[in-house]
Protein backbone atom coordinates (compact mmCIF):
# COMPACT_ATOMS: atom_id res chain seq x y z
CA UNK A 1 0.00 0.00 0.00
CA UNK A 2 1.34 3.44 -0.94
CA UNK A 3 1.85 6.17 1.67
CA UNK A 4 -1.07 8.06 0.17
CA UNK A 5 -3.44 5.09 0.31
CA UNK A 6 -2.33 4.33 3.85
CA UNK A 7 -3.07 7.89 4.93
CA UNK A 8 -6.51 7.80 3.34
CA UNK A 9 -7.35 4.48 4.99
CA UNK A 10 -6.07 5.70 8.36
CA UNK A 11 -8.18 8.87 8.24
CA UNK A 12 -11.33 7.02 7.19
CA UNK A 13 -10.87 4.37 9.88
CA UNK A 14 -10.18 6.91 12.63
CA UNK A 15 -13.16 9.09 11.76
CA UNK A 16 -15.77 6.62 10.56
CA UNK A 17 -18.30 8.25 12.92
CA UNK A 18 -18.37 11.24 10.57
CA UNK A 19 -19.49 9.19 7.57
CA UNK A 20 -22.98 9.70 6.25
CA UNK A 21 -25.10 6.53 6.12
CA UNK A 22 -24.95 4.75 2.77
CA UNK A 23 -22.75 7.45 1.27
CA UNK A 24 -21.11 4.84 -0.94
CA UNK A 25 -18.40 7.27 -1.99
CA UNK A 26 -15.08 5.82 -3.06
CA UNK A 27 -11.73 7.33 -2.19
CA UNK A 28 -10.02 9.14 -5.03
CA UNK A 29 -6.81 7.49 -6.29
CA UNK A 30 -3.90 9.82 -6.95
CA UNK A 31 -0.88 8.80 -8.95
CA UNK A 32 1.18 11.85 -8.09
CA UNK A 33 3.25 12.25 -4.97
CA UNK A 34 1.18 11.85 -1.79
CA UNK A 35 0.42 15.01 0.17
CA UNK A 36 -1.58 15.45 3.35
CA UNK A 37 -4.08 17.57 1.41
CA UNK A 38 -4.66 14.86 -1.19
CA UNK A 39 -5.06 12.12 1.40
CA UNK A 40 -7.44 14.21 3.49
CA UNK A 41 -9.51 15.23 0.44
CA UNK A 42 -9.85 11.60 -0.65
CA UNK A 43 -10.72 10.44 2.86
CA UNK A 44 -13.38 13.14 3.27
CA UNK A 45 -14.93 12.07 -0.03
CA UNK A 46 -14.95 8.48 1.20
CA UNK A 47 -16.69 9.63 4.38
CA UNK A 48 -19.44 11.24 2.29
CA UNK A 49 -18.56 14.93 2.66
CA UNK A 50 -19.70 17.11 -0.22
CA UNK A 51 -16.84 18.50 -2.30
CA UNK A 52 -16.90 22.01 -0.81
CA UNK A 53 -16.65 20.63 2.73
CA UNK A 54 -14.00 18.07 1.79
CA UNK A 55 -11.95 20.93 0.32
CA UNK A 56 -12.21 22.94 3.56
CA UNK A 57 -11.12 20.02 5.73
CA UNK A 58 -8.31 18.99 3.38
CA UNK A 59 -6.84 22.50 3.37
CA UNK A 60 -7.13 22.66 7.16
CA UNK A 61 -5.44 19.26 7.55
CA UNK A 62 -2.56 20.41 5.34
CA UNK A 63 -2.23 23.59 7.41
CA UNK A 64 -2.33 21.59 10.66
CA UNK A 65 0.37 19.20 9.45
CA UNK A 66 2.61 22.06 8.36
CA UNK A 67 2.05 23.90 11.65
CA UNK A 68 2.82 20.83 13.76
CA UNK A 69 5.45 19.36 11.49
CA UNK A 70 3.77 15.95 11.43
CA UNK A 71 0.72 14.06 10.17
CA UNK A 72 -1.65 12.31 12.58
CA UNK A 73 -4.57 10.48 10.98
CA UNK A 74 -6.46 10.33 14.29
CA UNK A 75 -6.50 14.11 14.86
CA UNK A 76 -9.40 15.71 12.98
CA UNK A 77 -8.75 19.43 12.33
CA UNK A 78 -10.49 21.56 14.95
CA UNK A 79 -8.22 24.58 15.44
CA UNK A 80 -9.71 27.80 14.01
CA UNK A 81 -6.33 28.99 12.73
CA UNK A 82 -6.06 25.98 10.42
CA UNK A 83 -9.37 27.01 8.81
CA UNK A 84 -8.24 30.67 8.60
CA UNK A 85 -10.91 31.65 11.12
CA UNK A 86 -10.32 34.84 13.04
CA UNK A 87 -11.13 35.00 16.72
CA UNK A 88 -14.64 36.07 17.69
CA UNK A 89 -15.88 38.50 18.81
CA UNK A 90 -13.84 41.19 17.08
CA UNK A 91 -14.19 44.72 15.76
CA UNK A 92 -16.98 44.90 13.21
CA UNK A 93 -18.91 41.95 14.62
CA UNK A 94 -22.67 42.02 15.05
CA UNK A 95 -24.02 42.74 18.51
CA UNK A 96 -23.51 39.74 20.79
CA UNK A 97 -26.19 37.45 22.14
CA UNK A 98 -25.92 34.93 25.00
CA UNK A 99 -23.42 32.13 24.37
CA UNK A 100 -26.12 29.69 25.48
CA UNK A 101 -29.45 30.65 23.97
CA UNK A 102 -31.12 27.60 25.52
CA UNK A 103 -34.30 26.18 24.05
CA UNK A 104 -34.94 27.99 20.77
CA UNK A 105 -38.53 27.72 19.51
CA UNK A 106 -39.10 28.32 15.79
CA UNK A 107 -42.73 29.34 15.41
CA UNK A 108 -45.20 30.06 12.57
CA UNK A 109 -46.97 33.19 13.84
CA UNK A 110 -47.13 35.84 16.56
CA UNK A 111 -49.72 33.92 18.59
CA UNK A 112 -47.31 31.02 18.92
CA UNK A 113 -44.46 33.42 19.71
CA UNK A 114 -46.39 34.91 22.61
CA UNK A 115 -47.52 31.52 23.84
CA UNK A 116 -43.99 30.09 24.04
CA UNK A 117 -42.53 33.31 25.43
CA UNK A 118 -45.07 33.23 28.27
CA UNK A 119 -44.23 29.56 28.81
CA UNK A 120 -40.67 30.59 29.65
CA UNK A 121 -38.90 29.61 26.42
CA UNK A 122 -35.79 31.84 26.42
CA UNK A 123 -35.35 32.27 22.65
CA UNK A 124 -38.09 32.38 20.02
CA UNK A 125 -38.10 32.89 16.27
CA UNK A 126 -40.96 34.05 14.08
CA UNK A 127 -40.84 32.09 10.83
CA UNK A 128 -43.82 33.66 9.08
CA UNK A 129 -44.29 32.67 5.45
CA UNK A 130 -46.06 35.23 3.28
CA UNK A 131 -45.50 37.30 0.15
CA UNK A 132 -47.82 40.05 1.37
CA UNK A 133 -45.76 43.00 2.72
CA UNK A 134 -48.65 44.30 4.81
CA UNK A 135 -49.27 40.94 6.46
CA UNK A 136 -45.55 40.52 7.14
CA UNK A 137 -45.30 43.96 8.73
CA UNK A 138 -48.35 43.28 10.90
CA UNK A 139 -47.15 39.84 12.03
CA UNK A 140 -43.64 41.01 12.87
CA UNK A 141 -44.99 43.92 14.91
CA UNK A 142 -47.40 41.57 16.69
CA UNK A 143 -44.54 39.19 17.51
CA UNK A 144 -42.47 42.03 19.00
CA UNK A 145 -45.42 43.04 21.13
CA UNK A 146 -46.08 39.42 22.10
CA UNK A 147 -42.73 39.03 23.88
CA UNK A 148 -43.04 42.28 25.82
CA UNK A 149 -43.18 41.60 29.54
CA UNK A 150 -41.26 38.33 29.11
CA UNK A 151 -37.53 37.61 29.05
CA UNK A 152 -37.70 35.90 25.65
CA UNK A 153 -35.30 37.02 22.91
CA UNK A 154 -37.12 37.36 19.57
CA UNK A 155 -35.48 36.67 16.21
CA UNK A 156 -37.33 37.27 12.94
CA UNK A 157 -36.69 34.84 10.09
CA UNK A 158 -35.93 36.52 6.73
CA UNK A 159 -37.99 39.71 7.14
CA UNK A 160 -35.11 41.93 8.24
CA UNK A 161 -36.61 45.25 7.12
CA UNK A 162 -39.81 44.68 9.09
CA UNK A 163 -37.72 43.50 12.04
CA UNK A 164 -35.74 46.75 12.02
CA UNK A 165 -38.89 48.86 11.91
CA UNK A 166 -40.55 46.88 14.70
CA UNK A 167 -37.50 46.88 16.96
CA UNK A 168 -36.97 43.11 17.16
CA UNK A 169 -34.02 41.68 19.08
CA UNK A 170 -32.52 39.99 16.04
CA UNK A 171 -32.86 38.47 12.58
CA UNK A 172 -32.14 35.00 11.27
CA UNK A 173 -31.05 34.57 7.64
CA UNK A 174 -30.29 31.62 5.41
CA UNK A 175 -27.20 31.32 3.23
CA UNK A 176 -29.13 32.50 0.19
CA UNK A 177 -30.13 35.73 1.97
CA UNK A 178 -26.68 36.93 3.00
CA UNK A 179 -25.87 38.66 -0.27
CA UNK A 180 -29.21 40.46 -0.71
CA UNK A 181 -29.91 41.69 2.83
CA UNK A 182 -28.44 45.01 3.96
CA UNK A 183 -26.21 43.64 6.70
CA UNK A 184 -24.63 47.02 7.38
CA UNK A 185 -28.02 48.58 8.04
CA UNK A 186 -28.95 45.75 10.40
CA UNK A 187 -25.67 46.06 12.25
CA UNK A 188 -26.00 49.82 12.62
CA UNK A 189 -29.54 49.31 13.96
CA UNK A 190 -28.15 47.04 16.68
CA UNK A 191 -29.91 43.91 15.46
CA UNK A 192 -28.42 40.56 16.38
CA UNK A 193 -27.80 38.30 13.39
CA UNK A 194 -28.13 34.54 13.22
CA UNK A 195 -27.00 32.68 10.10
CA UNK A 196 -27.78 29.15 8.91
CA UNK A 197 -25.07 26.68 7.88
CA UNK A 198 -25.07 23.12 6.60
CA UNK A 199 -21.44 22.05 6.74
CA UNK A 200 -17.86 23.34 6.83
CA UNK A 201 -17.97 25.58 3.75
CA UNK A 202 -21.16 27.32 4.85
CA UNK A 203 -19.93 27.67 8.45
CA UNK A 204 -16.80 29.44 7.26
CA UNK A 205 -18.84 31.65 4.94
CA UNK A 206 -21.20 32.53 7.78
CA UNK A 207 -18.32 33.30 10.15
CA UNK A 208 -16.91 35.80 7.65
CA UNK A 209 -19.97 37.99 8.31
CA UNK A 210 -19.25 38.02 12.08
CA UNK A 211 -22.79 37.03 13.11
CA UNK A 212 -24.20 36.91 16.63
CA UNK A 213 -24.76 33.15 16.35
CA UNK A 214 -24.47 30.35 13.80
CA UNK A 215 -27.07 27.62 13.31
CA UNK A 216 -25.81 24.11 12.52
CA UNK A 217 -27.98 21.59 10.71
CA UNK A 218 -29.90 19.78 9.78
CA UNK A 219 -28.77 17.35 12.45
CA UNK A 220 -31.50 14.77 11.74
CA UNK A 221 -33.96 14.30 8.87
CA UNK A 222 -36.76 16.85 8.80
CA UNK A 223 -39.91 17.12 6.72
CA UNK A 224 -40.40 20.83 7.36
CA UNK A 225 -37.96 22.10 4.76
CA UNK A 226 -36.38 20.69 1.62
CA UNK A 227 -32.67 20.47 2.45
CA UNK A 228 -29.92 20.74 -0.16
CA UNK A 229 -27.59 18.65 1.99
CA UNK A 230 -28.01 15.36 3.82
CA UNK A 231 -28.61 15.34 7.60
CA UNK A 232 -25.26 15.90 9.28
CA UNK A 233 -25.60 13.57 12.26
CA UNK A 234 -24.21 13.79 15.78
CA UNK A 235 -20.58 13.03 14.88
CA UNK A 236 -20.32 15.96 12.52
CA UNK A 237 -22.26 18.24 14.87
CA UNK A 238 -19.67 17.54 17.58
CA UNK A 239 -16.85 18.36 15.15
CA UNK A 240 -18.53 21.62 14.14
CA UNK A 241 -18.99 22.60 17.80
CA UNK A 242 -15.29 22.02 18.54
CA UNK A 243 -14.26 24.23 15.64
CA UNK A 244 -16.81 27.03 16.11
CA UNK A 245 -16.82 27.14 19.94
CA UNK A 246 -16.10 30.90 20.00
CA UNK A 247 -19.62 31.50 18.63
CA UNK A 248 -23.03 30.90 20.14
CA UNK A 249 -24.23 27.81 18.27
CA UNK A 250 -27.75 26.53 17.60
CA UNK A 251 -28.40 22.93 16.53
CA UNK A 252 -31.49 22.48 14.37
CA UNK A 253 -33.26 19.79 12.39
CA UNK A 254 -35.36 16.88 13.60
CA UNK A 255 -34.52 17.40 17.28
CA UNK A 256 -37.02 16.19 19.88
CA UNK A 257 -37.12 14.72 23.38
CA UNK A 258 -35.83 11.34 22.20
CA UNK A 259 -32.54 12.66 20.82
CA UNK A 260 -32.10 15.87 22.82
CA UNK A 261 -29.62 14.38 25.35
CA UNK A 262 -27.34 13.15 22.54
CA UNK A 263 -27.46 16.56 20.85
CA UNK A 264 -26.58 18.32 24.10
CA UNK A 265 -23.67 15.93 24.64
CA UNK A 266 -21.92 17.52 21.64
CA UNK A 267 -21.54 20.73 23.65
CA UNK A 268 -23.82 22.88 21.51
CA UNK A 269 -25.21 25.81 23.50
CA UNK A 270 -28.69 25.97 22.05
CA UNK A 271 -31.21 23.64 20.44
CA UNK A 272 -33.91 24.78 18.00
CA UNK A 273 -37.22 22.94 17.83
CA UNK A 274 -40.21 23.32 15.56
CA UNK A 275 -42.63 20.40 15.35
CA UNK A 276 -41.52 18.98 18.69
CA UNK A 277 -43.28 22.00 20.21
CA UNK A 278 -45.98 23.07 17.76
CA UNK A 279 -47.26 19.51 17.21
CA UNK A 280 -47.20 18.57 20.91
CA UNK A 281 -50.45 17.86 22.75
CA UNK A 282 -49.34 20.25 25.48
CA UNK A 283 -46.67 22.61 24.10
CA UNK A 284 -46.15 24.40 27.42
CA UNK A 285 -45.52 21.13 29.26
CA UNK A 286 -43.27 19.91 26.46
CA UNK A 287 -41.25 23.12 26.58
CA UNK A 288 -40.83 22.75 30.33
CA UNK A 289 -39.71 19.13 29.94
CA UNK A 290 -37.19 20.07 27.24
CA UNK A 291 -35.72 22.80 29.41
CA UNK A 292 -35.48 20.42 32.34
CA UNK A 293 -33.47 18.03 30.18
CA UNK A 294 -31.22 20.90 29.08
CA UNK A 295 -30.62 22.06 32.65
CA UNK A 296 -29.70 18.55 33.78
CA UNK A 297 -27.17 18.29 30.93
CA UNK A 298 -25.19 21.32 32.07
Image (cartoon, rainbow, N blue to C red):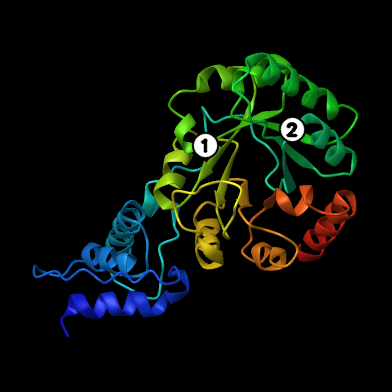
Q: Quadrant of residue 65?
A: bottom left
Q: Which mark is residue 288?
A: none
- Residue at image location 27% in from the left, 72% down from the top: 26
Dot 2 corresponds to which residue? 154
* Residue 70, percent from left and from top: 29, 71
Q: How many marks?
A: 2
Above or below — where is 223 with respect to 127?
A: below
In screen coordinates, is 152 left or right of 107?
Answer: right
User: Under tag 2, what secondary structure?
Assistant: strand
For mark 1, does the 10 Å Cα neighbourhood hold few (<14), some (14 to 19), or many (20 or more) residues? some
Q: Is residue 88 visible?
A: no
In screen coordinates, is 278 left or right of 48?
Answer: right
For mark 2, does the 10 Å Cα neighbourhood hold few (<14), some (14 to 19), or many (20 or more) residues? many
Dot 1 corresponds to which residue? 174
135 and 177: which is toward the camera: 135
> Label 2 near label 1: C-beta < 8 Å?
no
Amino acid sequence: MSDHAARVAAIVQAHAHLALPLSGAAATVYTSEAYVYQAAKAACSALGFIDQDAECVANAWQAMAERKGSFDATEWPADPQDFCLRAAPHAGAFAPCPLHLGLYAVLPDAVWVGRMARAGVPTVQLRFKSDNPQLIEKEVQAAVEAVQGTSALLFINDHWQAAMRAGAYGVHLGQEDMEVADLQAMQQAGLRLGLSSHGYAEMLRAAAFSPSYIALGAVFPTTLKRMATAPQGLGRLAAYVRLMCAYPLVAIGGIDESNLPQVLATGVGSVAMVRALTAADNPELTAAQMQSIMRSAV
